[in-house]
Amino acid sequence: MSIAGAIMVPHPPIILPEVGRGEEKKIYATAAAYEKAAAFAAELKPDTIVLTSPHSVMYSDYFHVSPGSSARGDMGDFRASKVRFEVGYDEEFVEALSDLAAQSGFPAGTLGERNKKLDHGTMIPLYYIDHYYTDYKLVRIGLSGLPLADHYRLGLLIKVAAETLGRRVLIVGSGDLSHKLLAEGPYGLSPEGPVYDERIMDVMGRAAFDELLDFDEVFCEKAAECGHRSFCIMAGCLDGLSLETERLSHEGTFGVGYGICTYRVTGEDPSRRLLDKWEERQRLILSEKRSKEDDYVKLARLTVESRVRDGKKPALPECLPEEMLERRAGVFVSLHKEGRLRGCIGTIQPARGCIAEEIIENAVSAALNDPRFDPVRESELESLEISVDVLSDPEPIDSPDELDVKRYGVIVTKGYRRGLLPPNLEGVDTVEEQISIARRKAGIREGESGVELERFEVVRHV
């Protein structure tokens, strides 16, 4: 058994007496729980601590593992430069993990080191652990913009690396909870903030780690959470293991959530292969959705699968609805994977002879030519959710008052710059947000005058 245990901990600088200068007393319960978690970590006597931090190097599509033999840092950014750290890295572990990632085509490794200095998401957990135990080497890993399930999968690779090397490993999931718990807090109050904290502490307190992957990312963003991806990696490291779990504390005194839990590994437990269970649930959900797809979505899916698998566009199927063959319209094809956008390309005005031809061309572009994403791989086809939006003809409007964020999409134009945003998008709740996002897509700065507005309606096919 190589993973000995794990701790979920926050990283508020104010908790350190050298930074808080008395303010840390207001989160005494968190500090006391931190001491208990650190003593728990020391009791496990790990050879290696694998620590995930939201404040280490982060990329949208890659997990950065800190390279080298050692690193230093201090709390100078928080007026406590005398609080200093120097750690030795477990280079053999880093190499093994990077090799495993490369062999499986997983986007993780030591490329792209931008700042070798230790971050506070790393230093604050070590501050407490080092009071009790220092005979370890560190592996520091940043988060990514990839789906939550990919963070969990990274945890599985970490577990394999630990088993391969025979290391006794402690996992530290460093991360605060919501940053929007109080109106008087530094980030204000969001309705999602307290809901997130209650839900995440329930999930982590029960070690129901598959439920971590069910959190909607728009909801997480509105809650301004910090550590969710850290906890997903930690959870992956504990997949298939029996645990003794203890929820130690939860506070939100300063408007930011701080939660602490400990996990002691007591053996193997095949019933806790939670990623497998989550993936099976997702397959059933997707299968049910696919069984209800209409002709518009079926054509988009047929196109994507044919082009990715065989390199060919399909012929138009027989017996398509009359509208698809006789009407011309702008069409957007959107691909999602595990709740996140995977590609979206469309035309505001019709560019082909009919809607069906528009769907085929835009489905190919969404899968292979969206510049924001790598081309869709064959291994991803079964996990794609596809929608097709058919646009009405745009009509000019004189004022934002003529928009309705649920009913109408908006097009903003200035000269050759043009940006579009469809209606009824999750997370876009006001006309002002809708126009602002469309302006950004067009490269039109806020405050620029002479901007023309158009509105359109959409029929969404799923």
Image (cartoon, rainbow, N blue to C red):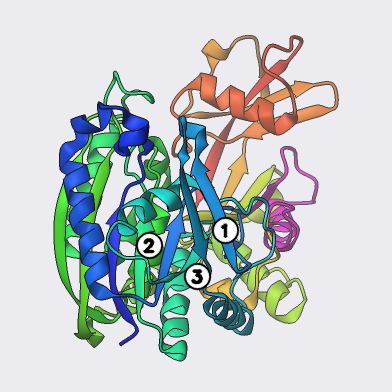
The residue shown at (31%, 65%) is 133
Give left or right: position of 154 versus 172.
right
- The mark that comes first in sequence, 2 or 1, is 1
Residue at 32% over, 77% down: 239
Mark seen at residue 71: 1
Span colored in magenta: 343-372
Where residue 257 sits, quadrant-wise, is top left
Residue 306 horizontal/vertical position (percent): 68, 75
Q: Residue 439: percent from the left, percent from the top?
A: 67, 25
Where does label 2 land, which residue? 232
Q: Earlier in the sequence, mark 2 or mark 3?
A: 2
Query: Could you tell me how far apart the alpha carbons at marks 1 and 3 are, in whole angstroms?
Result: 40 Å
User: Where is the N terminus found, in terms of image quarters?
Assistant: bottom left
> Can you tell which of label 2 and label 3 is closer to the viewer?
2
Q: Which numbered marker is on residue 383?
A: 3
Q: Secondary structure at mark 3?
A: helix
Quarter of the image holding residue 273? bottom left
